[in-house]
Amino acid sequence: MLRDGPGKSGARLIGHLGGTRVSKVCQWSRDGLPPGRSTLRVVRDAGPIARSCFARILQGRNLMPFIDTSSLAVIERLPGWHGRYFHSPSMTFAHYDFTRAASIHEHFHTQEEVYEVIEGELEVTIDGVAQIARAGVVAIVPGNVRHSVKALTDGRAIIVDYPRRPGFGDG
């Protein structure tokens, strides 16, 4: 659990990571940024946990801890796939509403891709093997593996790519 605490200039991130207490690791900074935007920077070395969990991921990057996906533009990348897209520093997220019989052609890319179906059913074919993804059944596509998708019903799904897919969903 992480929480904000008082600090000299902003708030310091304190809490527990992997059972180890982390204190005075990162400092909030809003200098020169628009309202509501923040960056974190490492202010003291707290060992390998701080380096791996904070420094590599968050150092010098804008934070966006909450995104209202309903406020994002809807883009129909393929017929029947209406998506709202955003990126974290290391991942790409697509929130889709899909219609029955909509499909995603067979393709591959370097990113690992996870299909989390919220409503409805998708037939996901991974390296020639088809299975049904539905609420509670997640499809995980390894990077560089051919895959395709067919919507068996209307529904909603969240698709996550790691690492980030620059330019994906940008219109």
Image (tube, helix red, strand yellow):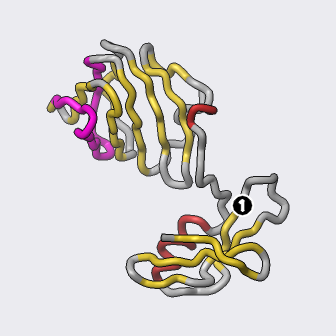
Which of the two residues, 95 or 42, is positioned nearer the viewer here?
95
Quadrant placement of the C terminus = top right
Task: Give x and y (percent) for residue 98.
Answer: 40, 20
Q: What's the residue at 23%, 25% (across, down)?
A: 123
Q: What's the residue at 32%, 14% (across, down)?
A: 100
In the image, the segment drawn in magenta is 130-152
How many numbered marks have been drawn onto this rendered protein structure? 1
Give the quarter of the image for residue 54: bottom right
Task: Give x and y (percent) for residue 113.
Answer: 35, 42
Up the image or down, 86 lies above or below 52; here it is above
Mark 1 crowd level (few <14, some 14–19, many ≥20, 10 Å Cα): some
Task: Give x and y (percent) for residue 44.
Answer: 63, 86
Q: Along the horizontal axis of the image, is 127 left or right of 6?
A: left
Which of the two residues, 24 or 131, is positioned nearer the viewer here?
24
Q: Along the horizontal axis of the image, is 104 left or right of 4?
A: left
Q: What's the residue at 75%, 73% (across, down)?
A: 10
What amino acid is labelled 1 in the image?
Ser
Does dot 1 land on a helix, a strand or a loop? loop
Up the image or down, 153 lies above or below 56; here it is above
Up the image or down, 79 lies above or below 83; here it is above
Q: Is residue 138 magenta?
A: yes
Q: What's the residue at 57%, 78% (across, down)?
A: 14
Q: Along the horizontal axis of the image, is 93 left or right of 70?
A: left
**Which residue extends farthest right?**
32
Q: Is residue 126 magenta?
A: no
Give the quarter of the image for residue 38: bottom right
Residue matched to label 1: 38
Task: Give x and y (percent) for residue 73.
Answer: 62, 27
Give the quarter of the image for residue 139: top left
Which of the two residues, 27 or 161, is positioned nearer the viewer here?
27
